[in-house]
Amino acid sequence: MNFTTKSRKSNIELLRIVLFYLVICIHVTSVGLSIQDTYTFWGFNYSYAMFMRIFSNIAVNCFVLITGYLLAQKNVSVKKYLTNIFAPFILYIPMYGQLYWSQGQHNPIVMIKDFCSGVGHFYHLWYIIVLCFFSFLVPYLNKLINVINRKQHLILTLILIGYASFAASFISITGLGLFQILSGNRIILFTCLYMIGAYLNKYGFKFNKYYAVTLYILIVACITFIAYLNQLKLSDLRIMDYSNIVFILLSILLFIFFIQINIENKIINYIGKLTFGAYIIHVYYITVLQKNLPFVAMLKKPNYFLYDISYILMVFVFSIFTESVRYHLGKFFIRFYLQLNTHIKYRNGMKNNDKPI
């Protein structure tokens, strides 16, 4: 989520860029893991795809950690928050409408239902839907964070981690769906991650960044290796729920690594602020490219991983470029509106002054 700030931290913006790449990876690399008869089961390509899918699973969690890290000690306007969320949709909804039309779906009601439900070409919008509901909690969470002490904050955070992860972890271990309702509660997960991000900003956390990223890679490698030993498919990995304690921990480790990086770069800052809008439009480009490129045929090639990386980079570049155009068009129209409004007020003022007394 991008928010207007007087100064941007390049390490955080770099993390946004990496996370957006990982989000695309989730939606692209997973295709080969779900289609039958693509590449050799647990061959090199399959192992690469599984590792990258597991590696990328923390993307959404880290985005929420960033939100808590940056906003927890600020006076947040819900109206401005929601405006930042919905601004990109002004341009992108017509683009998705064109996508539906080009695929023979000419009933706008279907698109509206898909949009509201987060399905069809809008499957990635579940994150936006939860974020909108979560926005109403942010001011109250900030007030709570300001009045509790460090110990209370830590205890509350641990309780939220336990609550958010218990159901998902229980299902992973037992395979039982008894607590599926709890595990599906993304608002609780977002609250948990927001509080963790707030804690790291307010009190810090002493843990070597190289240890953090090394541990992150080792855990991902271990999960992949266990899946290999048991010859598991992606659908068999119940641990992949975002609320699972393992992926909450992995999110924190990657986040700790990036917040300790000392970097300042204007290009990174610029691209980083475009990632939220690019997230909204990236599925459009995934769909268009899959239609026009022989992606399924690429899955059967020995060097598939190179095609996968190239494909993800294409979606990344197109999405960032489109959001850059939208961003500058938005600034132009806002500037034009303000100038026009000022001119109208000036003209009205001149007319009032010309009236006889």
Image: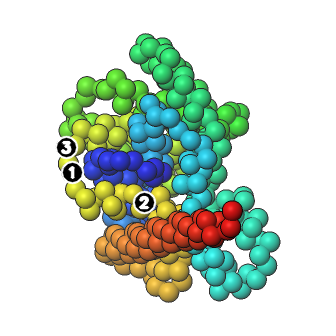
Seen at 29% across and 39% down, the residue is 259
Query: Does residue 66 appear to the left or right of 166 in the view shown?
Result: left
Check contact, mark 1 vs mark 3: CB within 8 A. yes
Seen at 30% across and 53% down, the residue is 14
Q: Amino acid under label 1?
A: Glu
Residue 265 occupies quadrant:
bottom left
Query: Does residue 351 appear to the left or right of 253 in the view shown?
Result: right
Q: Residues within 10 Å of mark 3 (few under 14, many from 20)?
A: few
Residue 337 percent coordinates (x, y):
55, 69
Check contact, mark 2 vs mark 1: CB within 8 A. no
Q: Which is nearer the eye, 118 or 172?
A: 118
Q: Which is nearer the eye, 14 or 121?
A: 14
Residue 312 percent coordinates (x, y):
39, 69
Is residue 140 visible in the rendered image? The answer is yes
Callout 3: SS: loop
Seen at 72% across and 65% down, the residue is 114
Which label sits on residue 207? none
In the rendered view, tell whether residue 293 sits above or below residue 322. Answer: below
Residue 223 occupies quadrant:
top left
- Quadrant location, the C terminus: bottom right
Please give the count of numbered marks on the rendered protein: 3
Q: Which residue is mark 2?
A: 275
Q: Which residue is mark 3?
A: 262
**Which comes sooner in the sequence, label 2 or label 1?**
1
**Which comes sooner in the sequence, label 2 or label 3?**
3
Callout 2: SS: helix
Q: Amino acid under label 3?
A: Asn
Q: Residues within 10 Å of mark 1 (few under 14, many from 20)?
A: some
Residue 157 percent coordinates (x, y):
49, 23
Which label sits on residue 264? 1
